[in-house]
Image (tube, rainbow, N blue to C red):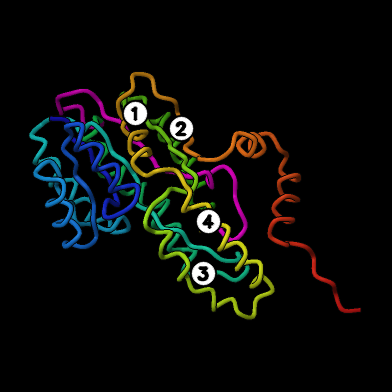
Amino acid sequence: MQSVVITGVSTGIGRATAEVLVGEGYRVFGSVRKAADGEALQQALGAQFVPLHFDVTDEAAINAAAAEVREQLQGQTLAGLVNNAGIAVSGPLLEVPTEDYRQQLEVNLVGPFLVTKAFAPLLGADESLSGKPGRVVNISSVAGIRAMPFLGPYAASKFGLEGYSEALRRELMLFGIDVVVIGPGPVKTAIWDKAEDIDIAPYADSPYRPILERFQKAFIRQGRDGYPADRLGRLILKALTTRNPQVRYAAVKGRLVEKLMMRVASDRALDRMIAGMLGLRPQARRP
């Protein structure tokens, strides 16, 4: 039985991917931060799911989990590592608290670095193991190539992940380990049912306040009509198994004209479009 490690399986993309892979006969080691989440998933998915308890910012806990997986692999290589765990910090870049910005980068950018460093030997960097080299799949975002206002911290982390993935892919050629990036747009998960409760009160006195309210409504609407999580799980399975995978897969739901516009329009043209949609126009100055 082939084995895959997935970070952040409690909900959303991670859980959907775990369900797809277990259904295809894989053993899935999935990271959770709460023991109760791991127990619930084990009950739902059966013996082929093995919970790993760590936060992706905790290097010692990650290394302990890698040792646990090594023991269970019994000298075989790991088929795949899916770096999925992540958070999204939003707000105007001039006003986002510094500690929130640092946490965004710690989880979304340093986290995959720590996890990959710990599990790469099991993917084949340790040549004493038997079996084919595995693959790394890093879950980026459309925000990794196009940054929207008020998602600056998130976009910074995903742009960084794209660069990290490219360098990693070229370095791991030495061991035959491939690295694939998946860049989804909004994904249809339960998170959007809670998004209306996001507190923007800290920006009550900000000149961005009315624009933030419009942005929040538009973003929630897109998310609820987003890319199906189970379909994304299938795409991750493809990235792990297809013979000659692309280096990057987009997973964006939308009309063809919108996709073409985002791809071919100049940055200045997109600036004007976004400004018109959200009302990002210069305010009148006092004489």
Name the spot of residue 104 as percent of width and height, x first: 45, 60
Q: Earlier in the sequence, mark 4 or mark 2?
A: 4
The residue located at (54%, 57%) in the rendering is 219
For residue 38, side relative to residue 140 (left or right): left
Q: Earlier in the sequence, mark 2 or mark 1?
A: 1
Does the magenta portion include 129? Answer: yes
For residue 175, side relative to residue 214 (left or right): left
Q: Is residue 195 above or below residue 223?
A: below
**Residue type beneath disc 1:** Lys
Does the magenta portion include 135? Answer: yes
Q: Nearer the viewer, mark 4 or mark 2?
A: 4
- Taking depth in this image into account, of 172 and 186 the one nearest to the observer is 186
Do the numbered discs 2 and 3 sit on residues whose CB atoms are within 8 Å? no
The residue pinned by badge 2 equals: 249
Name the spot of residue 96 as percent of width and height, x first: 55, 69
**Disc 3/disc 1 C-alpha distance (Å):** 38 Å
Do the numbered discs 4 and 2 sit on residues whose CB atoms are within 8 Å? no
The residue pinned by badge 4 equals: 221
The residue pinned by badge 3 equals: 98
For the residue labelled by badge 3, is the local secondary structure a helix, a strand or a loop?
Answer: helix
